[in-house]
Image (tube, helix red, strand yellow):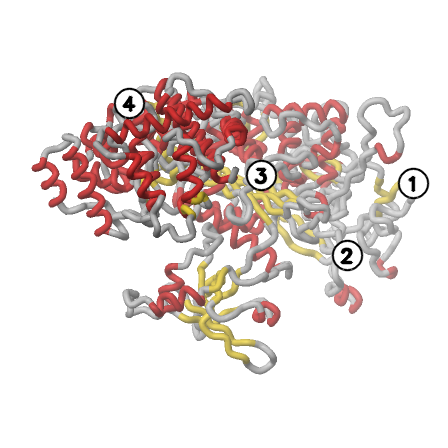
Amino acid sequence: MEAILVKVFATALALSQVVARPDAVKTQFDPEQDKAEVVRVLNDGCTYMKKAFDIENLDIDDLITTAMTDTKAGDDEIKAFKGVKFSDLFTAYKEICKKEKVEKSVIDAGEVIDFYNLAMANLPDHTRLKGLKLPGMSNVTDAGGKRFAELFEPNHRRISIPISQVPQHVKAAFIAAEDKRFMTHKGVDERSVIRAFMTSVADTGKRQGGSTITQQVVKNLLVGDDISYERKMREIVIASRVEHTLSKDEILELYLNAIYFGRGAWGIEMAARTYFGKSAKDLTIQEGALLAGLTKGPNYYSPDRHRDRAKERLAYVLDRMEDDGAITTAQRKDAEAAPITLTAYQRPRRDTGFAFVDQLYREARTLPNVGSLTGTSFVVRSTIEPELQKAAEAAMQDGLAKYEQSMGRTSFRGPEANLSDAVKKVQADPKADQTKPAWQLALMQAQPPLYDVHWTPAIVMDKTPIKGGFDSIRVGLRDGRTLPLSTFGSNTRRLIGMYDLVYVQIIEGKGKEGTRVELRSRPTVQGAAIVLENKTGRILAMVGGFSYPLSQLNRATQSRRQPGSSFKPMSYLAALASGLQPNTLVNDGPITLPPIGDTRYAQAKDYWSPKNYDGGGGGQTTLRRALEQSKNLVTAHLLDGGIAPTPAESLDKVCQLAMEAQIYQQCERYYPFILGAQPVRVIDMAAFYAAVANEGMRPNPHAIEQVEKDGEVIYKSPNRLVSIGSADRPAFFQLRTMLQGVVARGTAARISALSPFVAGKTGTSDDENDTWFAGFSNDVTIVVWVGYDNAGRVRRTLGHGATGGRVALPIWENIMQAAWKVHAPRVPLPGPSPEAAKQLIALPIDVRSGQRIEATSSRYSQYPQYGQYGEQQQQPTQRFMEYFRLDPTGRMQDSQYKLVSRESPFGAQGPEEWDQERGLFYRRDSDTGLFGNPSGLPRAPEPRFRSQGGLFGNGFPFPFTPPWAQPQYESQQQQQQAPQTRQQPQTRQRTQNERSSEQRPQVRGQRTQPDYLAPQRY
């Protein structure tokens, strides 16, 4: 038996059961024992079909005989049935339907059964349709209530409505257009099937559908729409079952909510809003009939592109409605005569906020009564501020490109697209705007593949060779200007051709310089940023990477990277909470900490000896200056008695604080943790820094403010702040002022002008894998991360010198400027809250030394500072109002010398000691000075300047007696009566060697640190 004939009769078997035995449909037959039964079923089906047409007084036998014996059949093959021959089909008809004996049977019932059984295996559960909620579309508004985005699954841009909201004349229009006998058939309309069959056999070239509304529901929602006999058989059987499970209204409701209408609209409600700007319940007879006509072919009958076809289809539907008695003749004429009025349509397009929208999906799953935003239709009020979002994306994209350009890592891999074909198409279009050149129109219509990159697209207009092997390239912009293009060199120019689409940055000319454009190339480096409102936790903007089309990974919420020094404030917060003050002196010298736990079997590698980023260190510094200059060694020293009595206990306190701040769910209990070795998420760092801005009240970051369903609010964000109780408000406020110092004098000093308004911390992980800047203003917290994904085996670092202050901070600054412009104005950071102010007192100090400055004393009014080789550099004392914690009795807790000795220089303690006779620091074990040479300086001075009295002949390696070596007096009067012993700096002419030494390059890894309290050695 021909394979195609097997499929035809297997389909006929399914159809015969549904029409002749609707209550006893079998899905499995025995290939041997049930052959006779299958033949009887086919015969019953054929008889039933003939009776159905007898109602219309048609001689079905003569009709089929005429069609089968048509001499115009050509090659005796039915094209509509893909290989079935007229002769075989006619023979089978006589054998099955007319029960005539034939010489050679073309039917093998066993083969038909085998194919039927296989097609009927594992049928979908039709009961799923009972009460089924179709995927819907949720509307997302921004923080101001304006529409921002639509959320829906592919092919499901719909808003489902109950059948009760569909007017009767609209339902009648769809029944008239698609399924006239819908209210009477049992899932399959045998007359439609025969009509479609006869049309196909006659080979008129006109395709005729035979599916009922019930079959279309089954096809759309259960069995799919592939063109095959198997799918058609399953559709027929399941449609019959659905008619026994669902009411006609339930079936029609599913149908009207599921079908596609064009204009990106699924379902009658979305179609009504898209085409007519109204709800389905308000559709007129003409509007309902027009939509009903679209179901046959939304593109073919589109009223936007084919108005004449749409009118013809509308007239057909109205005629059918009149025939069915659904409308009167007058209503039909009025509907036909009325002009078709459509709302203007432009498919919603966004070029921003794609990572943020993804976050909405994930956040909704955690909310009560919400779940999936596409499971039904919601109105979601989000927290995004579109202007700030776009500014954050632009700042990130520019920042990443500029970093690679500054490091010489820019790699142009080719244009975004070529518009040659688009230009030719415009040139050939007689309807095109003749006032603009073809290239400009093509550029205006072009959609770059990176649709969220906020650079300017340009088209290459001219490429002329010039001397030196270079090309002079000019590009055109959408505003019609043509400008010269600056590129990255000859190799880049060779990759650019005529009518290429490239991204550029416009550089406006100044003075005699003309305006030009610089080529922009997709960077390889990635970044992430988040803008968080301090008091509420609302996510105002979120950047997940350079471009969403290139990578859908949201690095702000889905990636964890080492925070480096941006995590250090956690340790300093723990120290402040334990009673240390910002002016507490801490050793910046080498430290080695033993392994945590049992050390009996510890090896040398188990001990931890950190280093500062620059490799230097020595002396002591205040807690404030250590954080400002991001000292690793000081941070490590805090573990040894600064936070708790033992390093292990201190580490546990920092871990507890980090988990309470919800930076980590579990803390890795090892020493490098305090220097930012354990990876974090950008969003969690933002919440912690916002807590610092709020004096310990941590907001809950969220992107969804409110969710409505059918006009009712089903969720509203509580916007609660949660206290981080392991540190009190005074400690958080002191930390905030110290982070202001990072901006004013520390590693973020490039934006020192903003220090009254912002505070923050840079971060750089080992080998420059990650760079960070986390900071806040009065209203928002912004965290920026930059680094390579390093998903493969080859790891790529950002390069030597690529620190958080150099890479991440410029991006952060641009985003903060945008936040001040569009969200909240720039205001100075406030003083302590009333609760914190009760436990704090502000006193003046010297910010470098941490020493208190008496209001009546000029003792610290001028402190001479000295350069690398002893030359005097006049720097006035930096008077600074420091906030000190008060004890429960209201007295200031003086902890300046809690970790160091008063007797050592400037409170210095450690392995180095002062030799009064030789005038230098030395180590007990080496006797070679702090910096490895007998001078006590980082570079040995010329031998002739050395003396038994020190470098300057006064017993010290600097030309004055330091305060710690001066006599101590009980009162100011006693000091005035005492003889003056302070030696003034000696005035002398510098030698040629000294003068030339000023030009010597500084030793790598030993940068000038104005925060050391031991005598200046640089």
For label 4, the crowd category at 10 Å Cα-Cα, with few meaning under 14, some 14 to 19 and many 20 or more, is: some
**Depth check, front residue: 256 or 868:** 256
Label 3 vs label 2: CA separation? 29 Å
Observer-side mark, 2 or 1, equals 2
- Residue flagged by tag 3: what amino acid is it? Leu
Which residue has dot 1 on it? 925
Observer-side mark, 3 or 1, equals 3
Observer-side mark, 3 or 4, equals 4
Label 2 vs label 1: CA separation? 25 Å
Which residue has dot 2 on it? 1003
**SS class of the residue under badge 2?**
loop
From the top left corner, tell me how far across and down residue 544 is, in percent: 53, 42
From the top left corner, tell me how far across and down residue 107 is, in percent: 48, 33
Which residue has dot 4 on it? 249
For label 1, the crowd category at 10 Å Cα-Cα, with few meaning under 14, some 14 to 19 and many 20 or more, is: few
Picture layout, residue 435 above or below residue 9: below
- Indicate which disc residue 368 carries: none
- Residue flagged by tag 4: what amino acid is it? Asp
Q: Are marks 1 and 4 in contact (CB under 8 Å)?
A: no
Q: Disc 3 or 4, which lies upstream in sequence? A: 4
Q: Disc 2 or 4, which lies upstream in sequence? A: 4
- Indicate which disc residue 739 carries: 3
